[in-house]
C-alpha cells in the first residue's frame, strides 16, 4: 500500500487541494520547501537534534502490567508520547514546520488549536526559533483548556478567541485560514493534524511517523514480535497516522482508530465520521469523510475531549478505511473518563482525554485476547490539561 499520495495529493479517492487561488502559491512553496528539506542533510540533522535534545525523543515503550493484570488477557504496551516536551505528540510536527517556516524566510506563524496541545507546541517552537506567533482557539475550548491558554501566552503567543459557530476546533481553523489568506507573504500556517490541502496531510504524517518508526523497533526488541493490535485515538488523526504508518505494510497487525462517540449516536452528539452521518465532502481544503446532513451542511459535534471535537478526518484515514486496512470504532465520553481514572489508579499515569479514548478501547478488547497477545496503544498526550474538566464533570454527575 502506497505511503505517499499521488502527484495531486490524493490518497485513493480522498485528499487534493481545494483552496482559494490566493493560497495556491504558498502551498506550492511549502511543498517544494518540504520536499527539498527532506533531501537536505543539514535540515534533517537539525530536526533530529531538536527532536532528541529539545523534544526528548525517543519516547519510551512502557508495559502497563498492573493495568493488564486488572483486566486479564492481552499484554498492553504504551508508546509514551505524553513524555514529549509540552506533553503530547504535537511538538514533533510543530518543530518540523517551524523549521520549514525559517527555510521559507517567514517570520510569523499562525495555528489553530482545540485541546490546546498543538497551540502550546507551536508557541513553544516559535519561542525556540524566534518567530512571531498567533494561535486561534474557540472560546468553548478556551474554557475547557484554560491552563493551556495561559501556557501559550507565557510562551509569547497571542491567543485569539473565536466566537463563531460552535466555538471549537472547526471554527478556529476557519479563522486561521482567513488570517493566512491575508498574510501569505510573511506568514506560515502550522496546521496541527493530517488535514487540509496537499501537502499538509502527507507532510504532517511524515513528521509524526517518528512515533511509528520508534515503536516498531521498540516492540520488536521487547517482545521479539510485532504487536497483534495497534490502537490510537483519531480526531484529525495525526498521532494515529504517525504510529500506523510503520505497521500498515504488515497485514498481520490489526490497526484500530478510536473516534469520539460523545453522548450518543444522534447527530450533534458525537464526532464519529465513520458512521452513516459521515459522507465524502470537502472541508478545510481537502476531500475526506465529513459529518454532514443530506443537504451537505456540516453537522455539529460533541466530545468531552476538545482535540477530538471535529467534523472531518484526515484523508489518508478515509482511504485506509475505504481499503479495509484500518478499522474505526467509537468510545463514549463516559467510557473515556472511566479509562482516564483507571489508568491513573493502576499505573500512575494521567492520560489526555483524547488518549483515554484509545485506552478505553484496549480495556474492552484485552480480556478476550490470549495472554501472549500484544496491544500497542499510542498514549498521545498527558492529562494535566483535562483535570479541571474531569473534576467539573464529576461534580455535575
Image (cartoon, grey):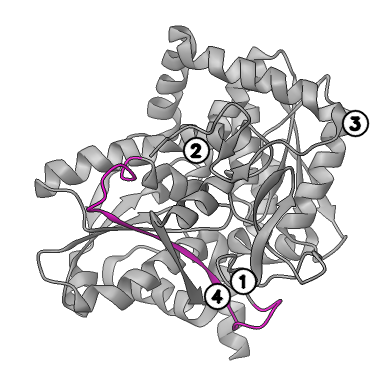
Residue 205 is marked as 2
Instruction: Name the residue at 77% across, 71% down.
Output: 294
Residue in the picture at 49% in, 38% down: 205
Residue 223 is situated, as x and y percent measured from the top left of the image, at 11, 50
- Of the pair 138 and 371, the residue shown nearer to us: 371
Q: Which residue is mark 3?
A: 182
Which range is magenta? 246-269
Q: Earlier in the sequence, mark 2 or mark 4?
A: 2
How far is mark 4 from mark 3, CA to CA? 36 Å
Image quarter in which the C terminus is found: bottom right
Q: Where does residue 305 sit, x and y in percent of width and height?
A: 58, 66
Q: CA distance from mark 1 to mark 3?
A: 32 Å
Q: Disc 2 and disc 4: Cα gap in Å?
A: 24 Å
Mark 3–mark 2 Cα distance, whole angstroms, equals: 27 Å
The label on residue 178 is none
* Residue 303: numbered disc: 1
Q: Nearer the viewer, mark 3 or mark 2?
A: 2
- Is the C-beta separation of discs 1 and 3 under 8 Å? no
Q: Earlier in the sequence, mark 2 or mark 1?
A: 2
Q: Secondary structure at mark 2?
A: helix
Within the magenta stretch, is there residue 247? yes
Quadrant (top left/top right/bottom left/bottom right) for the N terminus: top left
- Pointer 3 with pointer 2, Cβ within 8 A: no
N-term mark: 4 or 3: 3
Q: Secondary structure at mark 4?
A: strand
Q: Residues within 10 Å of mark 3 (few under 14, many from 20)?
A: few
Q: Residues within 10 Å of mark 1 (few under 14, many from 20)?
A: many
Label 4 belongs to which residue? 261
Amino acid at each position: 500500500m502506497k505511503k505517499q499520495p499521488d502527484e495531486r495529493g490524493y490518497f485513493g479517492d480522498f485528499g487534493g487541494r481545494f483552496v482559494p487561488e490566493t493560497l495556491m502559491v504558498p502551498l506550492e512553496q511549502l511543498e517544494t520547501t518540504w520536499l527539498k528539506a527532506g533531501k537536505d542533510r543539514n535540515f534533517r540533522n537539525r530536526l533530529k537534534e531538536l527532536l532528541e535534545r529539545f523534544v526528548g525523543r525517543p519516547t519510551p515503550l512502557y508495559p502497563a502490567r498492573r493495568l493488564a493484570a486488572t483486566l486479564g488477557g492481552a499484554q498492553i504496551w504504551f508508546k509514551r508520547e505524553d513524555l514529549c516536551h509540552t506533553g503530547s505528540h504535537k511538538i514533533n510536527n510543530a518543530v518540523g514546520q517551524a523549521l520549514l517556516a525559517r527555510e521559507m524566510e517567514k517570520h510569523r506563524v499562525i495555528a489553530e488549536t482545540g485541546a490546546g496541545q498543538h497551540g502550546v507546541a507551536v508557541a513553544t517552537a516559535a519561542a525556540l526559533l524566534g518567530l512571531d506567533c498567533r494561535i486561534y482557539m474557540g472560546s468553548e475550548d478556551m474554557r475547557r483548556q484554560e491552563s493551556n491558554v495561559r501556557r501559550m501566552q507565557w510562551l509569547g503567543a497571542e491567543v485569539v478567541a473565536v466566537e463563531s459557530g460552535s466555538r471549537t476546533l472547526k471554527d478556529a481553523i476557519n479563522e486561521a485560514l482567513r488570517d493566512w489568506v491575508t498574510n501569505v507573504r510573511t506568514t506560515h500556517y502550522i496546521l496541527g493534524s493530517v488535514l487540509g490541502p496537499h501537502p499538509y496531510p502527507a507532510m504532517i504524517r511524515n513528521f509524526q511517523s517518528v512515533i511509528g518508526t520508534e515503536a516498531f523497533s521498540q516492540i520488536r526488541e521487547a517482545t521479539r514480535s510485532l504487536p497483534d493490535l495497534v490502537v490510537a485515538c483519531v480526531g484529525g488523526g495525526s498521532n494515529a497516522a504517525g504510529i500506523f504508518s510503520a505497521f500498515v505494510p504488515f497485514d498481520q497487525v490489526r490497526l484500530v482508530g478510536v473516534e469520539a462517540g460523545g453522548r450518543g449516536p444522534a447527530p450533534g452528539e458525537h464526532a464519529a465520521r465513520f458512521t452513516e452521518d459521515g459522507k465524502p465532502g470537502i472541508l478545510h481544503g481537502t476531500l475526506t469523510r465529513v459529518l454532514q446532513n443530506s443537504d451537505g451542511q456540516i453537522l455539529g459535534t460533541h466530545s468531552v475531549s476538545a482535540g477530538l471535537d471535529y467534523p472531518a478526518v484526515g484523508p489518508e484515514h478515509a482511504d485506509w478505511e475505504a481499503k479495509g486496512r484500518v478499522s474505526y470504532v467509537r468510545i463514549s465520553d463516559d467510557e473515556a473518563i472511566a479509562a482516564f481514572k483507571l489508568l491513573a489508579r493502576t499505573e500512575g499515569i494521567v492520560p489526555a482525554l483524547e488518549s483515554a479514548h484509545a485506552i478505553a478501547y484496549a480495556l474492552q478488547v484485552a480480556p478476550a485476547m490470549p495472554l501472549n497477545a500484544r496491544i500497542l496503544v499510542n498514549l498521545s498526550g498527558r492529562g494535566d490539561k483535562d483535570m479541571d474538566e474531569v473534576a467539573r464533570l464529576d461534580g455535575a454527575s
